[in-house]
Amino acid sequence: MPILRTIQRVPGGLMVVPLLLGTLLNTIDQMHLGVVQDLLGWLGAPKTASGHYEFLRIGGFSEQLFKTSALTLIALFLFCSGSQMNLRVGGRAMKKGVILTTAKYLTGLAVGVLVGWTLDPWTGLFGLSTMAIIAAMTNGNGGMYAALTSQYGNRSDTAAVAVLSLNDGPFFTLMSLGLLGSHFPFIAFVAVLLPIALGMLLGNLDHEMRAFLKQGEILPVPFFAFALGANMNLAVFFNPTVVGAGLLLGVMTTVLTALAGILAFKLFREKSVIAPVAEATTAGNAVGTPAAIAAAASVAAASGMMSAAEAQAYQALVPIATLQISISTISTAIMGPLAVILVDRWQRSRGIDGRLEDDAPEMVAAAETAPVAHG
């Protein structure tokens, strides 16, 4: 049975499919159906605080993996992602990576600030919170970027992914919310950054360790996605506000971050703009950012730097923001490649071949025969 192949046909499938499956099972669980209650009672399952039986809360390894593992697995993912951030990047690739990371981050931050100041930071634009906007718009799909730039871009475009990896995870979102007035203690930033930093250290000290940890960029994803879904209700996903807001988030990510990246590339006299358009997506791992931010808010509340009400507000955003970002991930996975194809045709009509380095026209043959990377 081609289960994996079928899941991978869905844009962002390794994240989205387990998330929806977990949400579906938790929705059924919360119905407390009589037949399920009788069966779990007969098996001797423990009751929850509400006095019911739930098949996702039976204790042991099962509950630890399928219900309560999200933050632990997200931390493992961040550690492994950090190990793939190569500090030995060529000058041109470094330049492009810094330009793209900065442009994408500032665009997401600017839109988030605008919505928060003019509307409401919690419900904002059609139900989009400032947190959801920043999390989705600042975190690009590195695998898709590498695949698209290896086919339509040049070598320095593709190598820039080493710098773009810096936007993986919740750190930029946490930093942005801190700039916008949320009082997170310094230890909350350390706690988020430490797994990434340790992974980066190991990966750059030992190339074999980097290769060993590479699978950790993929393996935890469906598991923490399922665990996130196992704490949501499917009714939220079918809320028109959530779906519409998620689609709007995807359009804003593709259009606005692409335009900002193109302008930044032109400012620094880069001829081809394939890379900025390829980066105009939402990464699947951004789905875990709301849960990570809520965890940091709990730390802030415990230390007295944030009110319990504000921490609870972040916690309440998790189900809605997670699903909105999921929809943005799916929609940008479709719009991103289409946008790259259109921009490539537009450039070629003006004599610009995105596969060539601007300062190395002799690399035509190498660019034409370069293998396509698979994200």
Image (spheres, helix red, strand yellow):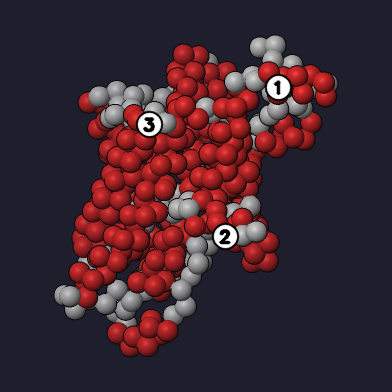
- Please give left or right for residue 201 compared with residue 280 in the image: right
State whether residue 25 is above or below residue 299.
below
Q: Residue at x 33, y 41 (%)?
A: 247
Query: Circle 3 sits in a helix, a strand or a loop, which is it?
Result: helix
Which residue does the numbered mark 3 point to in the structure image? 242
- Specify the amino acid type for callout 3: Val
Q: Residues within 10 Å of mark 2 (few under 14, many from 20)?
A: few
- Specify the amino acid type for callout 1: Val
Cα–Cα span, label 3 and label 1:
32 Å
274 or 300: nearer the viewer: 274
**Does any portion of residue 74 appear in the rendered image?**
no
261 or 277: nearer the viewer: 277
State whether residue 82 is above or below residue 342.
above
- Please give left or right for residue 14 compared with residue 32 in the image: left
Which residue does the numbered mark 2 point to in the structure image? 5
Which residue does the numbered mark 1 point to in the structure image? 35
**Does any portion of residue 245 appear in the rendered image?**
yes
Q: Residue at x 60, y 27 (%)?
A: 28
Q: Which corner quadrant of the image does residue 99 belong to?
A: bottom left
Give the number of callouts: 3
Image spot of residue 371 (x, y percent): 47, 78
170 or 197: nearer the viewer: 170
- Please give left or right for residue 361 compared with residue 267 in the image: right
Q: Residues within 10 Å of mark 3 (few under 14, many from 20)?
A: many
Mark found first going from the N terminus, 1 or 2:
2
Cα–Cα span, label 1 and label 2:
34 Å
Image spot of residue 101 (x, y percent): 37, 53
- Please give left or right for residue 350 compared with residue 48 in the image: left
Q: Residues within 10 Å of mark 1 (few under 14, many from 20)?
A: few
